[in-house]
Amino acid sequence: MAADLSVGSPVFIHGLVSEQGQALNLKRGEVVAAEDAGRLGVAVAGDSPKRLKRMNLLSAHRMEDRQLLLQLLVLRRRKLRLVMPALKQLLKEDLGLILLVSSYVSSAPSCLFHFGGFMRQVWMENWCFLSVQGRVVAKSLAQQKASRLDAASCDVGLGRVLFAGGCRRHPQLCARDDFFKSAELYDCLTDTWQQLPPMTTRRHGATACQLDGKVYVLGGMKINRQFLLLLGRGRPGLPFVAMGYGVPDSGVDFAYVSVQEAYLLMKNDKAVFVDSRDEDDYKTSRLQTSFHLPANALIMKGSSVEKSLVQHLIDLVNSGKTLICLSDACIKGNVNRGHVSRCRHIAQYLVELGADRSLIVRMAGGINAWKRAQLDGILGELRPMYAGEIQNWDFAPPKLKEEESEDEALPEISPAKGAGGGYVAALSEEAALAVGQQIEISGLKTRAELNGKAAIVKDFVADSGRWEIELLDETKERLRCKPESLLLKSAKQETPKAVEPAEVEVGCGGVVTENCERITCKVRWVPSRPFRQDQPTAYRVLKSDLFKKPNVSGDKIIKISRPVSSTVRTTGELFVGASGGIWAELDVTAGEKKGWIYVKGPGFGASSCKVTSEYLQA
């Protein structure tokens, strides 16, 4: 009788009739002593070992015993306990008939099981969710010896679940041995894991089903050299450090440039910008000329990523352009909830596909730092953003106490002493708005009658980004205006001096090493334009053939050529032609020749009047 039980076998106790024995019924135990005089030694947690007959023990490994145990659990449900005396009397204590009738009255208690998962890391916790007195209670279950992600799973009945294949960690971080061909079985009655014979091949992302007592593992990716190459393995000369979004920070980072350096690289047509944020964030607020390559899409929905765009970006980098990766704050992974920041993910992704690492950089402080510096070129919301939400002007991203700010370590960029530009360098500090200064109102549309009137600055309202002013007339009226609608009396009619433009040295790349080797280049100093919403001062070239007018009043139009994805610099001023075409004034201070460039419109000639063509994109 006890041949199938040995020391260490898991068992369940049943059928004890004494008052003390009934308390042990249906409890889990373990055989701790071999059979002696027809009884086995069984230990139950929290109690001393008992000598019990084999007939009072159900083997956790024997299918017939497991079936009987589940049926006995049915009999313990409340609504069956009420009718049990009548059933016993009617069926003359026949347990088999009682179980048969009970199967029509009630089913075995069911609950939800949750095994592992992935959320920025592989979780090994397993849970069972039970309903206790009308509320759900979570119970922790035994863990596997090793984490298992993307495995095939199948309910094989009688409280058992099979797992086969899968991988140890995120697939982008896995070497060959991190993909499994092993299989294991979880037993919810004993809360234990059992190793099963392995499959013949390693499989990732397969599915499984049970049919006629057998489990079939179907589909998935067979792990071989070709599969590893698809994940970016095995390319000679390229060290692989995968950094998928949600993967713990590996410590590999990229060189940084300051917002001032990034601005000058843009205004000298030496950089391309890539925004790594989600589409909603990108539509709400973005930097002019930037491409959009969302980091989340690479992992969550790789098929949605435009492969031609990725290749185009790699080609631009390898042609010598600096590629600047953007996010809201561009913070480090160890601060960003323990995983890789989005702009860093995009940077690593492009490197893994063949882009020159030394020409890919991140912008310290992100787009928010650009806004704080009040540099021109923001399209959409001017206020800072973080985690998909618009923030107050005084917002600062999370930062570790011991962490050095990247922009603190970058050099301050300014024109050489005495040098000028289109505006004789940037406006001097005396030309900045401040409380008590006298100004002149300019450019108001809703209250155009106030344009040209003098006023004095009273206060700055941070929430709206406007200055409160008081009119210097008998009305003494107070109103709030945007900075661009206020002209300082001293700066009102200044005429730029004809001086040679200054050159400055800026960072344009680098390799993160112990010495942090930065690559620099010389660029033309270009002063910033007014910080205004939706007033682009740079455009990305969409078509190589462009059209230019020397002046807006003339009819002369000439064709010029520019490389696709190069940058055309403008002043922010627009002109709408007679046919509806939009022209932008070229920025002489940024090195462009004087004139107006055609942005978009119906084209030229009678045959094109119904077709809108876009030549430049902000």
Image (cartoon, rainbow, N blue to C red):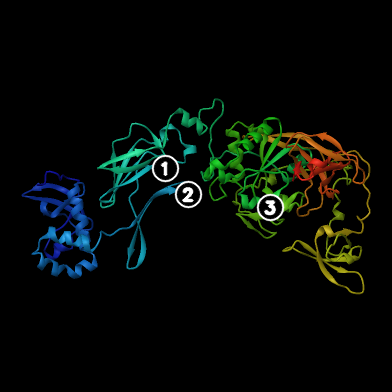
The amino acid pointed to by label 2 is Met
Front position among marks 2 and 3? 3
Q: Which residue is mark 1?
A: 150
Image point 33% across, 63% down: which residue? Answer: 131
Front position among marks 1 and 2? 1
The amino acid pointed to by label 1 is Asp
Q: Is residue 546 left or right of residue 157?
A: right
In this rendered view, identify the residue nearer to me: 201 or 260: 201
Q: Residues within 10 Å of mark 1 (few under 14, many from 20)?
A: many
Up the image or down, 340 lies above or below 469; here it is: above
Q: Secondary structure at mark 3?
A: strand
The amino acid pointed to by label 3 is Ser
Q: Which of the labelled discs sits on residue 553, or is there none?
A: none
Is disc 1 in contact with disc 3, using a CB cutoff of under 8 Å? Answer: no
Q: Which residue is mark 3?
A: 285
Q: Secondary structure at mark 2?
A: loop
Q: Which of the labelled discs sits on residue 119, or is there none?
A: 2
In this rendered view, identify the residue nearer to me: 447 or 254: 447
Q: Residue furthest front?
A: 607
In this rendered view, identify the residue nearer to me: 100 or 587: 100
